[in-house]
Amino acid sequence: MTDLTLTCKRTIKAPPEAVFNAWLDPDIMAKFMFPSPEMHISESRSDPKVGGRFFVNMVADRDLPHEGEYREITPHSRLVFTWEAPWSAPGTYVDLQFAPVTGGTEITLTHVRFVDEESRDNHKNGWNGILANLDNHLTGA
């Protein structure tokens, strides 16, 4: 295990409130928290408070459960949560920053700690897919 980190950025044509709140609403999470069109979410739950937990079950050719604990919730600007899956490195977490920009919100996603470079690279592709899904969902694309 190493402290490898990845960062993804995307500007979404929606206000920070909508972009931020999407990460806490299980019904909306089910519409974007999967990395590719071949996948879907079969179950999503969220207890959106510091110390609360979330769960999403991504489904491809098999179930891919992911869950975590909300560590920081600063409305409309920052969200930090652990990222737990059977193949995740211990202590991995995701830090989301939401910044208002002309015409929308710039979201910066930083994921910290991976078992190896291949896992980091796979997650980078996955997170970029999730951010694209979020953008499509919020903008109606």
Image: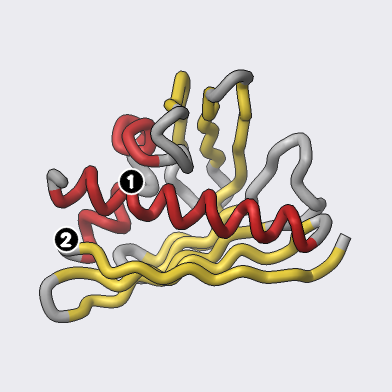
Nearer the observer: mark 1 or 2; the answer is 1
Residue at the spot 13% in from the left edge and 44% down from the top edge: 140
Please indicate, yes or no, whether residue 112 appears anywhere in the rendered image: yes
Q: Pointer 1: what residue?
A: 133
- Viewer-proximal residue among 64 and 78: 64
Q: As displayed, is residue 27 above or below residue 104?
A: above
Q: As displayed, is residue 41 above or below residue 50?
A: above
Judged left or right of residue 32, residue 68 is right
Judged left or right of residue 76, residue 93 is right
Residue at the spot 48% in from the left edge and 66% down from the top edge: 109
Q: Callout 2: 10 Å neighbours few (<14), some, many (20+)?
A: some
Q: Amino acid under label 1? A: Asn
Q: Pointer 2: what residue?
A: 14
Q: Position of residue 74 (x, y in %)?
A: 40, 66
Q: Quadrant of residue 104?
A: bottom left
Q: Position of residue 56 (x, y in %)?
A: 51, 32
Judged left or right of residue 58, residue 130 is left
